[in-house]
Image (cartoon, rainbow, N blue to C red):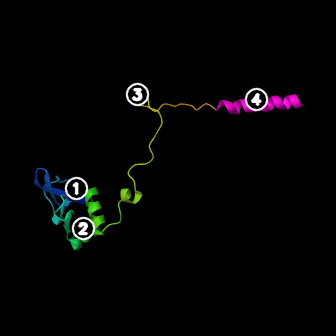
Amino acid sequence: MVVRLRLSRFGCKNKPFYRVMAANSRSPRDGKHLEVLGYYNPLPGQDGGKRMGLNFERVKYWLSVGAQPSEPVQRILFRAGLLPPPPMVAMGRKGGPRDMRPVDPMTGRVLNVEKPAPANQQKDGENEAADEANSA
């Protein structure tokens, strides 16, 4: 049985409230769980901050026995100081350099456009060969 630490949604429509749960990975999001580990309220309070509360000892226990946190829970545990930063935070920027190659709009495949050598270099090479022949 694989145990996941994940969020279970509560609250009303457009006012979400989540509980951090230890649950079997095959159970549904709001279904059966093993233990409630804390809560997370993504809506800002009167002070403007998001509220969360965790039972640190129980979270450390579940992590020590091999429970895998979901991505949102991993970010929450990083903010709480229980986990190292996830790879996306360490990378600093989402995504890499943009691919600027031309794409065929009909097939969606990348077009292989060969870059021709600049005309000046070919002429310079021919001129040097001609200069050498003239000087000889």
Q: Which residue is mark 3?
A: 107
Q: CA distance from mark 1 to mark 2?
A: 14 Å
Q: CA distance from mark 2 to mark 3?
A: 48 Å
User: Is residue 70 among what the camera can see?
Assistant: no
Of the image marks 2 and 3, the number of the one nearer the N terminus: 2
Please name the amino acid that badge 4 sits on: Glu
Q: Which residue is mark 1?
A: 25
Q: Residues within 10 Å of mark 2 (few under 14, many from 20)?
A: some
Q: Comparing marks 3 and 4, which lies closer to the viewer?
A: 4
Residue at the image position 35 percent from the left and 66 percent from the top: 84
Outermost residue, bottom direction? 57
Q: Are marks 4 and 1 in contact (CB under 8 Å)?
A: no
Outermost residue, front direction? 47
Q: Which residue is mark 2?
A: 62
Q: Which residue is mark 4?
A: 126
Q: Secondary structure at mark 3?
A: loop
Residue 133 position, x and y percent, is: 85, 29
Q: Secondary structure at mark 2?
A: helix
